[in-house]
Each structure stands twice: as structure tokens, then as C-alpha cells.
Amino acid sequence: MQILDLDHTDRRILELLQQEPGINAAELGEKIGLSQSAVWRRMQTLREQGVIVDQPVKIDREKVGLNTMVFAHVKLTSHGRSNLAEFSEAVREFPEVLDCYVMLGNVDFLLRIVTEDIKAYEQFFFEKLSQLPGIQEVNSSIVLSDIKHTNVLPI
């Protein structure tokens, strides 16, 4: 993967886009001292280079009824490890799983899961997650409260 050489202006644009996702090119231009068209061209170049991937809408999960967040540490059997791709594909199909990471260490995967409540997580666990082939062990940790959650990178 090539690391791009971004100048101060590009970094400032990225910083502001992360802090204020709805900001437009004209507002960005005012804040950094460039014209709207100059900012738009820079943003377009950053998109073409793959630096700006998307600008998602952030939704408060609790306000839409997803009150329970769980981190699940998944360990596969030695036979299951040969099917990491199969497990990964299956997990991608579960809308409850927001994030899935392949880990180095004593577990193979870390999943971030949201559900309506503990009962819904129990149902997800028994009907979906634990039914996947090759699972040796799942340790679930229930999140009590969010202290910090961000997608803003320290640019």
C-alpha cells in the first residue's frame, strides 16, 4: 500500500471533513482560505486516490433501539483456522456484526455486535454465531457504556 504525501492543505481538508461530515466545499474553503472550486478539486483528487473512502451518516444506536453492544472474542478449532475465509464470509452476512477483525494472539477474531437487548444477543449467539463451523470458543463482553467511540483519524 502506497502512503501518499499529503500537504498541509489536504490534511486540513481531511481533518475538517472528519470533524464536520456534512460540511460542503464552500464552507471548507472559507475555513482554510481556498476557493470552493479549489477545495472541490482537492476533495475529488483525494477520492480518486482512495484517501476519502466515504462520508457515512452517524446514527445513535440507542435511539434506534440497539441498546446492547457486545465484543465477542472467537477462537476457532485448529481445523477451523484453515477456513478463515469461510468464517469471514459468513460473518459479513450478519447485520448485527458491525466490525470483524482477524487477530494475532489467543483468539482468532474480534467482533463488535449490536442488538436490541441481551435476549436478542442470546438469540443471535445461539441461532447464528455459534452455528458457524469450526468455532471452538466464544467469549462475550457486554459494553456498559461508551466512553469514546470515533472514526476520526489523528491526521
Image (spheres, rainbow, N blue to C red):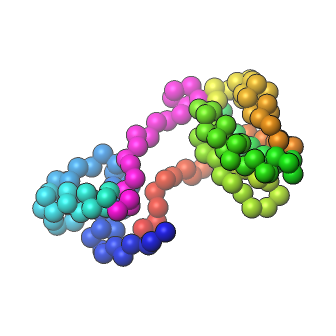
Left or right of 114 on screen, residue 11: left
Q: From which residue to which does the magenta span run?
A: 49-67
Up/down of 43 relative to 114, above or below: below
Left or right of 127 on screen, residue 20: left
Up/down of 56 relative to 94, above or below: below
Counting the numbered discs, the total is 0
What residue sits 30% from the left and 45% below the top?
A: 22
Left or right of 147 on screen, residue 86: right
Provide residue 83's location: percent of width, then percent of height: 75, 47
* Front-lying residue, 24 or 136: 136
* Front-lying residue, 12 or 131: 131
* Front-lying residue, 36 or 65: 36
What residue sits 87% from the left and 51% below the top?
A: 78
- The C terminus, quarter of image: bottom left
What residue sits 69% from the left and 54% below the top?
A: 102
Provide residue 19's location: percent of width, then percent of height: 37, 54
Q: Is residue 16 visible?
A: no
Provide residue 84's location: percent of width, then percent of height: 72, 49
> In which quadrant of the rendered view does residue 7 lie?
bottom left
Question: Does residue 70 belong to the magenta stretch?
Answer: no
* Front-lying residue, 29 or 134: 134
What residue sits 30% from the left and 68% below the top?
A: 10
Q: Is residue 133 visible?
A: yes
Up/down of 142 relative to 101, above or below: above
Q: Main secondary structure of the magenta part?
A: loop
Question: Does residue 53 belong to the magenta stretch?
Answer: yes
Provide residue 14's location: percent of width, then percent of height: 34, 61
